[in-house]
Each structure stands twice: as structure tokens, then as C-alpha cells.
Amino acid sequence: RKGNVIITGASSGLGLATAKALGESGEWHIIMACRDFLKAERMARAVGIPKENYTVMHLDLASLESVRQFADTFRRSGRPLDVLVCNAAVYFPTAKVPTFTAEGFEMSVGTNHLGHFLLSRLLLEDLKKSDFDSKRVIIVGSITGNTNTLAGNIPPKANLGDLRGLAGGLNGVNISPMIDGGEFDGAKAYKDSKVCNMLTMQEFHRRYHEETGITFASLYPGCIATTGLFREHIPLFRLLFPPFQKYITKGFVSEDEAGKRLAQVVSNPSLAKSGVYWSWNNNSASFENQLSEEASDPEKAKKVWEISEKLVELA
Ligand code: NDP
């Protein structure tokens, strides 16, 4: 049978390119989990994913209620779940003040980390039930959260500190909206959220890989400088960023190529190892990359996991 894969944020950028790559193979049915139903449908058609190879389902990661509803609706569809890709993200690099999710968490960490944390925890039960030969949970990471890289050292750097802001619920009222308890900084909040994504993948691996056989992986697909992720940035940045990445850092990767990379992590038998953070070299060959000290700290991963469980009311 075809594999069934849920991709969050499949209505643009990397998620759409991945849906396209998998949809064209004919071996996958893609559940496009998107906040804008009509856009997702329009984009699926625009890139030519065959109708029988995808379903659009509504998911707003900025609302835990919506995440729970999505998991219920998916379950009631009767479709097995073989692979989950946590891809959606928001990024507010120029924001002066924080915005908040439905439950009152700072928007970047609330959407990118907490929304996906609840989603993947709920859907783990569905993945366990699938008889697919290579079940996977993939959480998209990023170089920017990794302070052991050049890109990860551009200030403001990711730093979760002692997690006091996260523990207090990131509400910006009686506690800082930042994980480390500091002043609001939109670029840092995004990087922190990506560190949480990478820590979550590793904690999943430690807690569930042996028992379930599920592969847990993360990746940095390369710098896809043309996606909507940079939509909130100043116009001059948006103009200069793609050529800068293409000619200076040489980290640039097209949306198509990045989509093929993520599609490999979904379906390629050679990328089935669990607990790995995948990257690609200039010849587009995949390799197991090293995470920064903070992004691979097991103590921090455990704490982020336990605090997140409380925030999304799983514990
Ligand atoms: P895009 O902005 O193009 O895509 C992000 C997707 O997330 C969009 O489809 C968006 O929906 C969706 N989304 C945003 N908020 C929500 C929400 N509340 N609920 C559901 N879906 C939501 O960015 P990219 O494709 O670049 O980013 C995809 C992933 O790749 C992210 O995890 C990002 O961190 C990662 N990444 C990107 C890099 C890059 O260079 N671009 C580099 C490294 C990692 P909508 O279409 O409605 O806007």
C-alpha cells in the first residue's frame, strides 16, 4: 500500500516542495495539515500533485484546541499514519513586541514548538498502530539554533538559559515571553523554538525508539532563502538574502531541492536511522551532522519535555 504522511505547513515553501516530491512518486498519500485550507488546496493544484495523492486537513498550530481537533478528525478518517513531518513555522525577525497563541504562549515557541509537541505526542498512538515497515517522526530543525556553526553565531544567539520563561508559560504578563526569561527578541524566539524542536526529536528517540521501532529524525535542509519564512523581514533583506546565500555563503538551496531532501528523510531506506540530525554537503549527499552543545544536552531535553507536557496539559 501507499504510505500515509502528515506534513504540517504543506501550503508553502519546504512543506509544499516535500509534498510535491512525495506526491509525484506515486508511493505516498499526503495529508496536508494547514491553517489556510483554500491556500493549501490551491497550492497543491498549482504544483500538480495528483488529486488522489493528497488530502487537505485544517490545522492551526497556534491553537492547542485546533491541534486536538486535528488529531481527532484524522483518527476518524480511518487512515493509518505512517510518517509525521513537523515542518510548519513562523518567524518574526523584526517584531518589536510579542504576539501570542490562543492559549497565550509567545507565538514562535507556541507554534513551532508547543503546537508540534502536542501534535506529535497525540499522534504517536496512531503511529504505533501502523503496520508500515518504516515509521518515522521528522521534526524540521535549523542551523540557526546551532551555535556550533557560523550561521548559529550571528546574534542574537539561541539560548534557553534555565528555562524560567518557558516554565512560567511565556505569557508576557507575569513572566517573560522568552524561554530564558529575557527581553522579547523575535529572531531569538525563533532560534530558541528550533532548539526545542531538535531537543524534542532526541528526547522522543530516547523515550520511544526502542519500544516502538519508530525512527525519530531532524534535519537542516540548507538555506532556502526564497520561502515565505522571511516574509516579515524588511524589503532590503528579502532582496539581498537569496543572492547572499547563493554567492557568498554558498548555503543556498532551491525549494525543489530542499523538498527532495526532506522527502528522502521521509522515505529513503538509507535515512532510517533514529536520533539523527541530517544535513547535506555541497554535492547534495546526506550526512549525520553534529548538534551544538545546547541542542544536544540530554538534561535540557528532559526538562523541555517535562515543562512542555505541563503547558499543553498532557501531564
Ligand atoms: P514558509 O513560511 O514558506 O512555510 C511555513 C509553513 O508553515 C507555511 O505553510 C505556513 O502556512 C505554515 N504555518 C505557519 N503558522 C502555522 C500555524 N499556526 N498552523 C499551521 N501552519 C502554519 O517557510 P519554510 O518553508 O522556509 O519553513 C519550513 C520549515 O523549514 C520551518 O520549520 C523552518 O524553520 C525550516 N527551515 C527553513 C529554512 C529556510 O532557509 N527557509 C532553513 C532551515 C529550516 P501558510 O502557508 O498559511 O503561511
Image: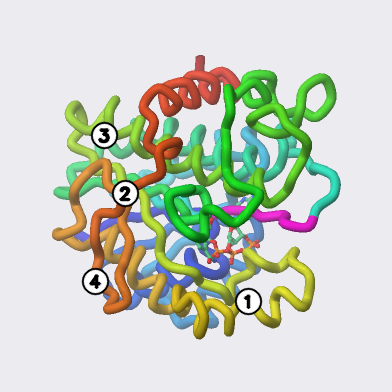
Q: Amino acid at mark 4?
A: Ala
| Of callouts 4 and 1, the N-terminal one | 1
Q: Which residue is mark 1?
A: 241
| Of callouts 1 and 2, the N-terminal one | 1
Element marked by disc 1 = helix
| Of callouts 2 and 4, the N-terminal one | 4
Residue 27 percent location from the top left of the image? 24, 68
| Residue 93 is one of the magenta-drawn residues | yes
Q: From mark 3 to mark 2, how far is it between C-alphas?
A: 28 Å
Element marked by disc 3 = helix
Q: Which residues are magenta?
A: 88-94
Assign the N terminus to one quadrant of the image.
bottom left
Label 2 environment density (alpha carbons within 10 Å; few <14, some 14–19, many ≥20): some
Which is nearer the eye, 294 or 71?
294
Q: Which mark is residue 290?
A: 2
Q: Viewed as shown, does residue 184 lie left or right of 39?
A: right
Q: Which residue is mark 3?
A: 128
